[in-house]
Amino acid sequence: MGAIFLNADLMLKARFDLRTLASALTSNGLYLLGDVTVKGGVWRATFESNLVRPTSERAIASILAAVESLDDNQHQAWQGCLTRCLDLGYQCGNGSFESTSLIDNQTIAKIASAGATLAVTIYRSPERGLTNSADPQGD
């Protein structure tokens, strides 16, 4: 088995309270993972698409649609975030063949236009033990 797409997370960090922006994003179709937290003056929130078993392309499109639906005030808050990271999670199998997950140029352009970054996190298969991967937000 090659790599399997698990999910796409949207991770936000800001020096302001993210609860209003989180509420808007969840109203626009995203699922808030856990709570909005604050540590050392930095607010954090992580979201994922509410789609069931989406492809990476569809998960990204769902997240970007939620962002594009923000009103002007909410969009200003989005732009004010320190980090706007789309993190694609994949589980790597034990097989010897490759897997490809295509992200087309229009989707990449939308990510860039939204001012977001793109990260890819690879997890080991459960048979090999889940690894503690590097945090794409730099923590």
Image: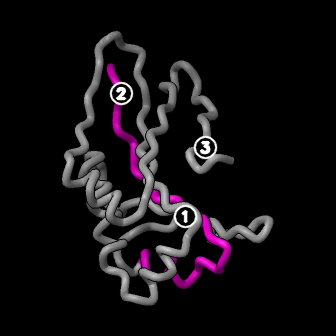
Query: Which residues are the magenta region?
Result: 1-26
Point out which mark residue 12 bears: 1
Q: CA distance from mark 2 to mark 1?
A: 26 Å
> Between tags 2 and 1, which lies in front?
1
Q: Residues within 10 Å of mark 2 (few under 14, many from 20)?
A: many
Q: Secondary structure at mark 3?
A: loop
Give, as a three-letter code, the residue at label 3.
Asp
Q: Is residue 104 above or below residue 86?
A: above
Colouring chosen for the image of the structure: one colour
Q: Residue furthest right?
A: 40
Badge 3: how crowded within 10 Å, few (<14), some, or many (20+)? few
Closer-to-camera residue (14/124) = 14
52 part of magenta stretch: no
Q: What residue is shown with label 3?
A: 135
The magenta stretch spans residue 4: yes
As drawn, is 100 to the left or to the right of 131?
Answer: left
User: Which image quarter is the N terminus in?
Assistant: top left
Position of residue 58 relative to residue 67, above or below, is: above
Q: Residue at x 28, y 25 (%)?
A: 99
Give x and y (percent) for residue 123.
Answer: 50, 31
- Disc 2: which residue: 3
Q: Position of residue 65 (x, y in %)?
A: 28, 69
Q: Nearer the viewer, mark 2 or mark 3?
A: 3
Residue type at numbered disc 1: Leu
Mark sitting earlier along the chain (3/1): 1
Badge 2 amino acid: Ala
Does residue 133 appear to the left or right of 94 in the view shown? right
Do the CB atoms of the residues marked 2 and 3 lie less than 8 Å apart? no
